[in-house]
Amino acid sequence: MNAAIRSRRIFILTAILSLIALPIAWYYFTQDYTVPGKENERGDFIEFKVSDVGFGASNSFTLTAYVHQPDEPPVKLGPVAGFGNRQMVAMFTDSGKWLDDSHYRARIADFQVDIRNKNGVWEMNKQRVTEP
């Protein structure tokens, strides 16, 4: 009889702790965050907003690119890509570099994103590349 009561108490305690932990985990894993890029010589920088989509094994992350310029509001360029985990997001954002003051490039595996300022307008070009 004591084993049955102890087992029931453990089950109830586990259920209560799960009900407390689940909302905390949901809050933590569904937070959006931003990853600022490196600044160029004019003070412009690229920022990626990382949105968490899904929970648990189906987790994925969507990146949205913004260009920040001194004394200007941020320019939203739109969605960049979706990635399966935070490591891929970090590898992509860490690879970003300014090739010159108006050309930013980030790449992971065969996926490359070029962000350029052409005649005062920022545009994003996404492509698959084969060369290293």
Image (cartoon, grey):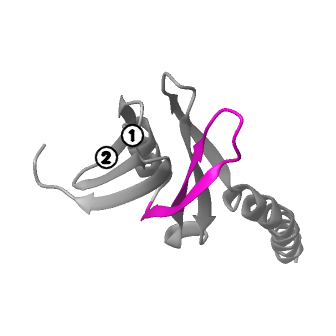
Q: Amino acid at mark 1?
A: Tyr
Q: Is residue 3 above or below residue 29?
A: below
Q: Quadrant of residue 16?
A: bottom right
Q: Position of residue 127 (x, y in %)?
A: 26, 61
The local secondary structure at tag 2 comes to strand
What span is in magenta?
62-84
Please, which residue is most extreme toward the left here?
Answer: 131
Residue density around tag 2, few if under 14, some if 14–19, many if 20 or more, within 10 Å: many
Q: Position of residue 112 (x, y in %)?
A: 29, 52
The residue where tag 1 is placed is 104
Q: Is residue 80 inside the magenta stretch?
A: yes
Q: Amino acid at mark 2?
A: Arg
Q: Position of residue 83 (x, y in %)?
A: 43, 61
Q: Is residue 14 left or right of residue 95?
A: right
In percent of the image, x 13 and y 43: which residue is there?
132
The image shows a total of numbered marks equal to 2
Q: Is residue 107 left or right of residue 14?
A: left
The local secondary structure at tag 1 comes to strand
**For the residues marked 2 and 1, what is the alpha-carbon distance in whole angstroms?**
10 Å
Q: Please tell me which residue lies in front, 30 or 68.
A: 68
Q: Is residue 104 left or right of residue 24?
A: left
In percent of the image, x 48 and y 51: which residue is there?
122
The residue where tag 2 is placed is 107
Q: Is residue 48 above or below residue 57?
A: above
